[in-house]
Image: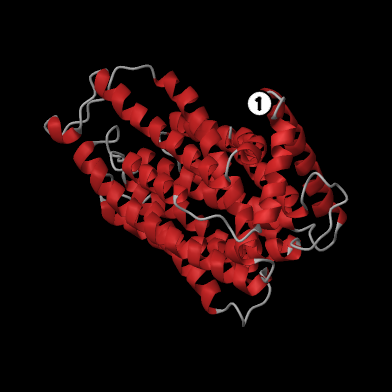
Amino acid sequence: MQVIGSILIAPLVKKFPTRSVLATAIFVFGSITILFLIIDAATGGKPRIANGGQLHYGTWNPNALFPLYMISGISYGMVELIRRIIPRDIVGGDVQKLRKMDAIVHILYEVAGTGGALLSVKMIKIFGNNFSFLITPPLFVCAGLTWICIDKLGHGEESEKEEGEEDERSFGSVDYMYSVTIGAKAFARSTYKGAIICFAHRKFIWLLPGYSFALYGHRYLENAISPAIAKRIMLDSSYSQIMVCGSNLGELFGALFVLITTTAIQTPLPFLRFDALALLIVWALPAYSHHIQPHNAVYAWRIAAMFVPISMGWAAGDVSLAAFIQASLARMESSDSQVSALGSVMAFLYSSYIIIYAILGSLLGTYIDKVFTADGNIYRALVNIGGVQFTVLCAIIIAAT
């Protein structure tokens, strides 16, 4: 659904200001989170604090999560694609400025992420899993209001006027669904062109493993391995947020390191290699899992400390590599007048990550459940989905760089 959200961006930004599209997307995202709260409360769910400290969920069908998550995915995809290409429009193609901007944004993002992870642990303890995200909708509303107030970028008024006239001529008699179809075709063409650029140029052929594979490994660590350990070993799903807190703190250190070394280290390769080697730390998880005692947060904090260097390497590589891509493609001429080189490459890399995670995440999640059912623990699963899988990722990234 994130890919569909990326497709919808094309026709929407031609009819409406980009800031309005972004604000609307985040407002929709916030509305979905409010629906979760309303539905659970309407079907008998109660916050933990109002139920004697006990969890009490609503009786609604969990299958309703799928359409709600699909809508959320569309909104997230719209925001995510623009976020990955807009820095070049703000600061131009200067790689130093791009790295500084990407690093500063990532630092602020991780400050919020680390604080949010710590807060969520407390919120889950007080309100329970079903009401712990009470603070999320107001924050989404604040983000949307902020985006509405953003001025237009420094584009000339004449070019904007000409572009507006062209859009009016183009969309005056064209149905929106047809525009979406055109956007889908343009996105497919853009992804195809991005693949051609990556695989046909020696300078860019390593971007798929260096960017998409590394992003997949990072997301899998936070969104799959961490919850599996918290739920199956620690017997408290809220502890996964403590581990994510360590991951976010590592990302903060990584982005800060890139900001400090912007002029000293001109290439993203050292950061990517450090990221690859840091992945091998995951091998410590299977052995350490035997020592974990349920319902003890100390062990979650120790695992969080393991995640710090892993995520530090990923964040440093991600920030420096994103700036490298933006700067390298800023002036690259595309043979197709309908798509840009930067947009094409980012669409290809991000779509590749989504597809990889969607396939492997589902298959490996089923594997974890089967191992737990057969063995009563997930030690064997941690060896394979953690140690073996991340060793393969390490070898691929090292070979690519």
Residue 266 horizontal/vertical position (percent): 67, 77
Q: Is residue 209 above or below residue 92?
A: above
Question: Is 251 placed left or right of 337 in the picture?
Answer: left
Identify the coloring.
Answer: secondary structure
Q: Nearer the viewer, residue 360 or 367?
A: 360
Question: Is 142 placed left or right of 128 in the picture?
Answer: right
Q: Is residue 333 above or below residue 227?
A: below
Question: Is 357 placed left or right of 168 in the picture?
Answer: left
The quarter of the displayed image where residue 191 is located = top right
Residue 362 horizontal/vertical position (percent): 56, 33
Reading the image, the residue beneath label 1 is: 176
- Tag count in the figure? 1
Q: Is residue 293 visible?
A: no
Q: Amino acid at mark 1?
A: Tyr
Q: Residue at x 17, y 31 (%)?
A: 54
Q: Nearer the viewer, residue 157 or 338?
A: 157
Residue 268 horizontal/vertical position (percent): 66, 69
Q: Nearer the viewer, residue 381 or 199?
A: 199
Q: Quadrant of the C terminus?
A: bottom right
**Secondary structure beneath label 1:** helix
Residue reaching furthest left?
A: 52
Q: Residue at x 61, y 81 (%)?
A: 263
Q: Is residue 165 above or below residue 218?
A: above
Residue 262 horizontal/vertical position (percent): 59, 77
Q: Residue at x 52, y 78 (%)?
A: 260
Is disc 1 surrounded by few (<14), some (14 to 19) or many (20+) residues within 10 Å?
few
Q: Is residue 4 visible?
A: yes
Q: Is residue 187 above or below residue 194?
A: above
Q: Quadrant of the N terminus?
A: top right
